[in-house]
Image (cartoon, rainbow, N blue to C red):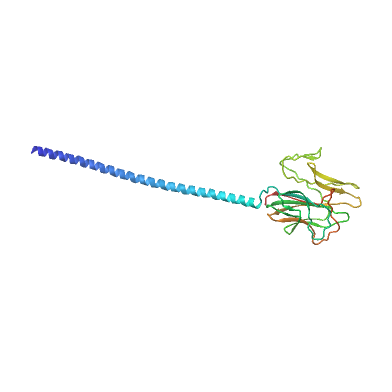
């Protein structure tokens, strides 16, 4: 009987121990479950952060692509509209004397410079290859007893008029790259590469005259014939105009539509009737 009691007591102890073990295991399982839940929440949070980063990266890539596309589109538009155009400047003159009528375009058919190919020597018309601020200058030299009014026209608007009067020249200085002119030799040496504009005025004394040339690297770039009180003066006239042009705008020199010119305008080896223009900046 005592053996049975002892055996039952032993079994009860085993059951109690197992119950305690089961309770501990259940607690461990609950702890693991809670940990798994927390890990799941952390993983979900990291997934959301990853998605947010991906969305942000996609947006940044999209913005970068948009910027690249816009830049390429702009460059393509500029290049397709004006391939290779970096500098615009022209200088042309008459190859022979001309007796123009009223409202007549002067065709300066002998080209000296045509950077950008904007000037047409057959029509006498300059077409702006790019937008910008342009300067135009023209000189008309009348023959003896000749006179008339000559206009600079841009897009049907008169930008300048001369009526055969001698005017003072314009001096242009470069504030960034100066000291190019030598007052002792009379020579200007270009301090930097570029397109240069030169202007000069000769005022003769009474009964004096002569042909004066502008020379650059042994090439004649311009000629004026100055004369005073010799009985039949060659008194050429010049003017300068500053015009804002869009691509495709046209500019030319013509006689007045309301004033009939008389006689002939001269252009030869000693005096040039000429037309010039150059782009100085982008549009304002």
Q: Position of residue 235 (x, y in %)?
A: 85, 52
Q: Residue at 58% of width from left, 51% of height from top?
A: 70
Image height of 181 relative to 131, above or below: above
* Quarter residue 215 falls in: top right
Q: Position of residue 51 (x, y in %)?
A: 44, 48
Q: Nearer the viewer, residue 1 or 168?
A: 1
Left or right of 144? Residue 188 is left
Image quadrant occupied by the N terminus: top left
Outermost residue, front side: 122
Q: Residue at 49% of width from left, 47% of height from top?
A: 57
Q: Residue at 31% of width from left, 43% of height from top?
A: 32
Q: Position of residue 231 (x, y in %)?
A: 92, 52
* Quarter residue 254 falls in: bottom right
How many marks overall?
A: 0
Q: Nearer the viewer, residue 86 or 42?
A: 86
Q: Position of residue 20 (x, y in %)?
A: 22, 41
Left or right of 198? Residue 57 is left
């Amino acid at each position: 009987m005592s053996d049975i009691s002892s055996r039952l007591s032993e079994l009860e102890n085993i059951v109690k121990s197992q119950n305690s073990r089961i309770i501990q295991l259940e607690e461990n399982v609950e702890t693991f479950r809670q940990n798994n839940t927390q890990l799941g929440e952390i993983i979900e949070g990291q997934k959301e952060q990853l998605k947010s980063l991906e969305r942000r990266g996609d947006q940044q890539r999209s913005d970068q692509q948009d910027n690249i596309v816009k830049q390429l589109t702009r460059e393509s538009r500029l290049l397709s509209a004006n391939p290779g155009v970096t500098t615009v400047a022209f200088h042309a003159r008459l190859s022979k004397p001309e007796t123009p009528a009223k409202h007549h375009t002067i065709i300066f058919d002998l080209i000296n410079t045509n950077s950008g190919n904007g000037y047409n020597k057959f029509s006498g018309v300059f077409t702006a290859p790019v937008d910008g601020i342009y300067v135009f200058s023209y000189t008309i030299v009348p023959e003896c007893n000749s006179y008339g009014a000559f206009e600079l026209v841009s897009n049907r608007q008169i930008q300048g008029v001369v009526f055969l009067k001698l005017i003072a020249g314009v001096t242009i200085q470069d504030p960034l790259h100066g000291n190019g002119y030598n007052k002792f030799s009379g020579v200007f040496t270009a301090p930097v590469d570029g397109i240069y504009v030169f202007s000069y005025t000769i005022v003769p004394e009474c009964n004096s005259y002569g042909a004066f040339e502008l020379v650059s690297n042994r090439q004649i770039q311009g000629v004026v014939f100055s004369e005073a009180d010799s009985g039949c003066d060659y008194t050429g006239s010049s003017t300068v105009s500053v015009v804002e042009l869009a691509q495709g705008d046209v500019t030319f020199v013509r006689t007045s539509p309301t004033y009939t010119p008389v006689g002939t305008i001269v252009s030869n080896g000693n005096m040039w009737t000429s037309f010039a223009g150059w782009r100085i900046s982008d549009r304002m």
